[in-house]
Amino acid sequence: MAEKKEKYIPQVHSKLRKSFIKVPKEIYQASGIMIFEKRIKSLLFTTDLAIIRNSNADSVMAVYPYTPQTTIMSAILEVSNVPCFVGVGGGTTQGLRSKYIAIDAELLGAYGVVVNSPMPNKDIKDIAKFLDIPVIASVVSFEDDYIGKIEAGAEILNISGGKYTADLVREIRSKIGDKFPIIATGGKTPESILETIKAGANAISYTAPSSSEVFASMMDAYRNKDMGEND
């Protein structure tokens, strides 16, 4: 049998935008999830507008540790050139407030809304019935009622179990079957990403470096260049 050749992919680069945040190539071994006819394998986990605008990720997952605000959602959705999934509460923000924030997200153009792990199933049900975009329910431990979240109307699970994420994905996948879509955090190494995909994740969320971290590495490069020129 002839060896399968890897397809050549032509590339076109910007003259100015050189510092793109690239998601690990291992993520592209995931099956992906089709959402509104777009296949999504990578989700950039950030709310940094500059990072969002300068990344090659398929999509953005914008969840943050404060009560959700329409102004923040609006800014992210306006800046992003890829689909966005935005947080609508689940911890301190629940009930009717989350429901109205969720419909704001849909009307602003979000591809889905993310509810944090503590969100009651009755609230998930209300939001799911109200929206025409998917509800993504977060699962953070083996004790989470992920079956209840699915029965309430969550169409995607977002699994984030720290160092136990792959084990959690494997456990949940064995209970819900092969077809239900799962997003999961992949960790920081190629090995952990591949393990999470092998465990059953269809898409991987990748935590981007902060702008300050990117800027620090850029400054180091400038310093090294200057030192070299002075030698």
Image: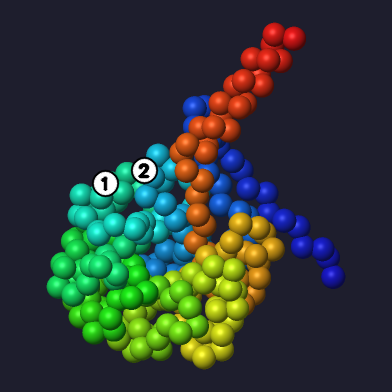
Which residue is rendered at x = 35% and y = 84% of the image?
149
Q: Nearer the viewer, residue 188 or 194?
A: 188
Q: Quadrant of the C terminus?
A: top right
The correct choice, above or below, for 144 with respect to 190 in the image is: below
- Name, please, the residue furthest toward the right: 1
Q: Position of residue 125 (x, y in %)?
A: 25, 83
Q: Secondary structure at mark 1?
A: helix
Q: Position of residue 210 (x, y in %)?
A: 47, 43
Q: Secondary structure at mark 2?
A: helix
Q: Badges 2 and 1: C-beta atoms under 8 Å apart?
A: yes
Q: Position of residue 23 (x, y in %)?
A: 56, 52
Residue 2 visible (yes or no): yes
Residue 32 visible (yes or no): no
Q: Quadrant of residue 96?
A: bottom left
Which residue is rendered at x = 62% and y = 64% of the image?
193
Instruction: Please report whichever mark, 2 or 1, sits nearer to the chain's N-terminal start.
Output: 2
Cα–Cα gap, marks 2 and 1: 8 Å
What residue is pinned by disc 1? 75
Which residue is rendered at x = 23% and y = 67% of the image?
93
What residue is pinned by disc 2? 49
Q: Quadrant of residue 68?
A: bottom left
Label 2 Cα crowd, 10 Å radius (few <14 / some 14-19 / many 20+): some
